[in-house]
Image (cartoon, rainbow, N blue to C red):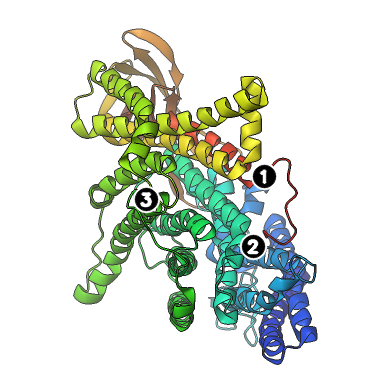
Amino acid sequence: MTILSNIGLSLLFITFLVSLYGIFAAVYGARRNAVVWVDSARNAMLLTFPLLTLVVFSLVLLLTGGDFQVAYVYSVTSRAMPLYLKITALWGGQAGSLLFWSWLLSAFIAAVTLRRWGSSHAGRDREFLPWVIVVGLITLAFFLLLSNFIENPFERYWQTPAGEMTALFQPKGALPLIPMDGYGMNPLLRHPGMVLHPPLQYLGFVAFVVPYAFAMAALITGRTDDRWLRITRRWTLFAWLFLSLGLVLGSWWAYQVLGWGGYWGWDPVETSALMPWLTGTAFLHSLMIQERRGLFKRWNIILITLTYSLVILGTFLTRSGVLSSVHAFAQSAIGPLFFAFISISFVVSLSLLLYRWNDLRAEGQVNSILSREALFLFNNLLFMGILAVCLWGVTYPLISELLTGQKVTVGPPFYERASGPLWGGLLFLMGIAPLSAWGKSTLATLGRGMWKPLAASLVVVVLVLVLEVRNPLAVLAFWLSGLTFFITLFQYLRGVSVRSRIAGEPWLTALWRVGGRNRRRYGGYIIHLAMVLMGLGIIGIEMFQSETQGALNRDESLRLDRYTVQFKSLRVFDTEDGRNVAQAVMHVYRDGRFLDEYKPRREYYYDAQQQVTIPSIRSTLEDDLYIILADWQPMTATNATFKIYHNPLVKWLWIGTYLFIFGMVVALLPREGTERQRGDEG
């Protein structure tokens, strides 16, 4: 195993040197107009991926082989862990996650260089190439700097002659120290949701580096048209898809594992992951305006720069440990370096934007406050408002500690009250924006497309009132959701009806074909429908959640709304993989009718010496019943404390996710019946 750690260590350093060489070669080639140097930089960029693949493979072998002399292996694995968890331990700690980030980034920036830059279609874009390489490799070199010199995953334990243990590289006179077993991964991370959540979120993060690199290349070269947007459109969609899925999967993990009855707690780290999603979503809407109307050129540069900076900031907040979070790793020395990198990259980006400010003048203007471009601008401003709320909430503990010496955090009520109306405004604009026309639109134009969906949405209001929903905010939220849902659905069906009539096709055939002719538009409609369904789940749990708690003896019950939960038994036992499990058996009744048996549990991991609460959940389209074993009497096992949540409609959040994925697949597929020009998109 020693040779594996040496190989990984050596290749990691070589990759860092290759990235530095690529930066130098690209800058020199661009300044001297020397194609051979630019091609050499391109080859260096391509080489980083196989080199880092070998580094990652070496670390995975060390993790699965249980080489506990390697400090990282000791900190995130143990003999009792199954093989799949030992593999996913690659991103289970700080050093490994930084290496994993670098590996994914090298894959994306290498893939960018595989475009046919010298072909007839993409040859005109070759002037972008050296500067795309520079931005991509500077970002990669920064993370490799951290992995090589501060958070190296190949550091090994040694025992000094004085009998002290150190994780530094071999001090003079020290002997290898190999622990018998490892500490093991944080039990909260040993869940299928956390197997997929970090890779998806990292994929979203690193993919946003690509459009940012092209934006900077456009500023450096003076290419102020929308070419850089067209090249990176598909990269941006991929980035947004992965980041969205990462956020949703993280929410599902929180709901299934953390045992507090919810899916989103405005944790500082999850909020820092939401912030680039906000700017990235605004960018996706805004780039369409530049492509269609030649507007918002400066704004798009600002948005992608903010997204890139927030991606790095989110990684910094997660890895530096400066914030209290269930996600954040321990305090380390990487914080100042992250802060310096974010500051320098933002200042350089802003300077380039100001340098090209006059060249980025809009080719037209917004002529109507109700035009589609105006509504998209309002949409962007609302996203920025939510970003401001999140940024203030995340940084307030740092500001308060700096000014007062005490770290004061803000809780979910601040975020919900400050951002709630803004989310409502976004939901409304998501519905009416597709009804408006480009260039000029009027109330009459909107009215003609809105009256039928408006009538249908009023039926939703009547229905929720019949169901005795009396909270005015809830009624308003359901009405907005219904209005947006029916507007989007009517727009889709209108396109199907027109095609069916003109082409003489059956409705089901037209339903498929209409999306194939304009996948971006109709994929967007499907995504909007999915967001409404997800919003339905959010409304249900946020506005109608109820809870109760109590200590029960055997055969005693707790009541919550229409449910009765009866405690039947408790069993405590050890498992072969190193856990001590306390599992309760609960009988659940609704309106006096027996439904099923549920088994909430608490698990204690001997290796990590940490306890995890695993709720038992009865989930239907109408509601979730969420049962938590909070405490028990270990001597008798006849008395236990339970906490129960009733979460209406929350399942629609996960159903909407499936529809969201389908909509993204539709939007990403090339248009049916046309051949995409090579080089038009990345």
Upstream in sequence: badge 2 or badge 1: 2
The residues tagged by marks 1 and 3 sit, at their Cα atoms, a distance apart of 27 Å
The residues tagged by marks 3 and 2 sit, at their Cα atoms, a distance apart of 25 Å
Out of 307 and 315, give the one closest to the viewer.
Answer: 307
Q: Is residue 34 above or below residue 440?
A: below
Residue 606, visible in the rendered structure: no
In the figure, is residue 306 to the left or right of 34? left
The residue tagged with tag 1: helix, strand or loop? loop
Give, as a three-letter code, the residue at label 2: Ile
Out of 544 and 660, give the one closest to the viewer.
Answer: 660
Give, as a three-letter code, the residue at label 1: Leu
Give, as a three-letter code, the residue at label 3: Leu
Q: Residue at x 54, y 59 (%)?
A: 291
Out of 39 and 416, give the one closest to the viewer.
Answer: 39
The reply to whether discs 3 and 2 touch (Cβ–Cβ < 8 Å) is no
Residue 345 at what x, y percent from top left?
48, 78
Residue 230 at what x, y percent from top left?
61, 60
Question: Are there few (<14), some (14-19), or many (20+) residues within 10 Å of tag 1?
Answer: some
Please state, as top left, top right, bottom left or bottom right, where the C terminus lies in the image.
Answer: bottom right
Question: Are there few (<14), some (14-19), or many (20+) residues within 10 Å of tag 2?
Answer: many
In the figure, is residue 404 to the left or right of 500? left
> Which residue is the site of mark 3?
375
> Which residue is the site of mark 2?
231
Q: Residue at x 65, y 45 (%)?
A: 82
Q: Residue at x 47, y 34 (%)?
A: 529
> Which residue is the site of mark 1?
669
Q: Which residue lies furthest to the bottom in this view?
A: 32
